[in-house]
Image (cartoon, grey):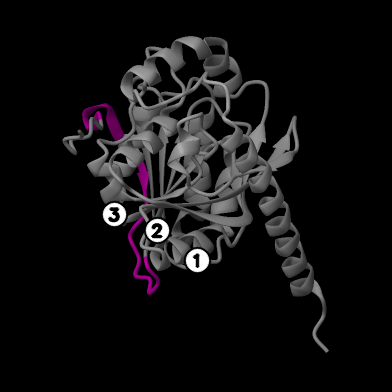
Amino acid sequence: MYSGRVMTNAQHARVAFATEERRADDVGVTVVVTLYNYARFIKNALDSVLRQTHGNIELIIVDDASTDDSQSLARSWLEQNGARLAHAKLLAHSTNRGLAQARNTAFANATNEFVFVLDADNEVYPDAIARLLATCRAKNAEAAYSRIEKFGDETGTGGDAWNPARLARGNYIDAMALIRKSAWQKAGGYTQPADIQGWEDYDLWCKFVELGFKGVFVPELLCRYRVHGTSMLNTTTNPNLEQIKVEMTRRHPWLRLDAPPTLREKLGAVIGRLRNGVLARNWRSREESNLRPSV
């Protein structure tokens, strides 16, 4: 079981930039952005945070010792736009600590109970934070996540309801999720499951299952996942997938990563695809009706 102690490497992070905190009436949400050599993407990610309809957002960016212009571009963006948020802070690791520890540093510095995870190459639609927050609070869940829209080198959608049995077969829930900081703490934070980076988010979801935590699925396209050849998934995780699978199964013995699907699982997958198709059509119909001019 988990001690609740999180290794944050606080001694390796310095405050590179921060804004004054301002009062806001809405429930506070902290958006954490981990950044490593994504200078070409970071502005789009941060612009999508600024467009959120939710009125009380704290932004924590952790630069994990980038070797390109990522940190300077993030600082420049904050200098121009940070005052428009409830609070903003740029933290810089002195050495590269990896994705899990970069996220832990960000969570440790978040001042709100609700924390949304955003990687620097992804984006969110304007209603994302508001919709996820409302659902997470209404369902009293430890996490809330939405349907994901893929863009870039690949298009499509993904996402489905929280199901521990399905998680045993593999991860289908993206890292872009609203998570209670208290749940992150109880789970011991993010952990790199192997010597090779990858599946940090899957490992966290597995720990949530083992702790009896609940995630709730919002069947709307609220988050955008950029598919590109230089992502960590393509350059690090997938080439070392078998090693990561072994380590994940060692950490979570209930996983069945390579077992053939049962008939029940096959039927569940078909039903899930049909259900998601209906949900997607309903979502599109709602969006189209919102765009129609009022009479």
Q: Nearer the viewer, residue 2 or 66?
A: 2
Looking at the rendered structure, the kind of residue marked 3 is Thr
User: Which residue sits at x=67%, y=21%?
Assistant: 229
> Residue 25 lies in magenta, yes or no?
yes
Is 282 displayed left or right of 27 in the figure? Answer: right
Tell me the SS state at disc 1. Answer: loop
Residue 195 circle label: none
- Would residue 9 be seen by someone viewing this image from the given angle? yes
> Residue 197 lies in magenta, yes or no?
no
Residue 111 circle label: 3
Contact, mark 1 vs mark 2 (Cβ under 8 Å):
yes
Q: Which of 25 and 272 is in front in this view?
A: 272
Q: How far apart are marks 1 and 2 (CA)?
A: 9 Å
Q: Residue furthest bottom?
A: 295
N-terminal-most mark, 2 or 3 = 2
Residue beneath disc 2: 29
Q: Which of 266 and 207 is in front in this view?
A: 266
Residue beneath disc 1: 54
Is 102 displayed left or right of 45 in the figure? Answer: left
Residue 68, position as x, y percentages in the image: 53, 23
Chain part drawn in magenta: 9-27
User: Which residue sits at x=38%, y=71%?
Assistant: 24
Q: Distance between the residues labelled 1 and 3?
A: 16 Å
Q: Distance between the residues labelled 2 and 3?
A: 9 Å
Tell me the SS state at disc 2. Answer: strand
Contact, mark 1 vs mark 3 (Cβ under 8 Å):
no
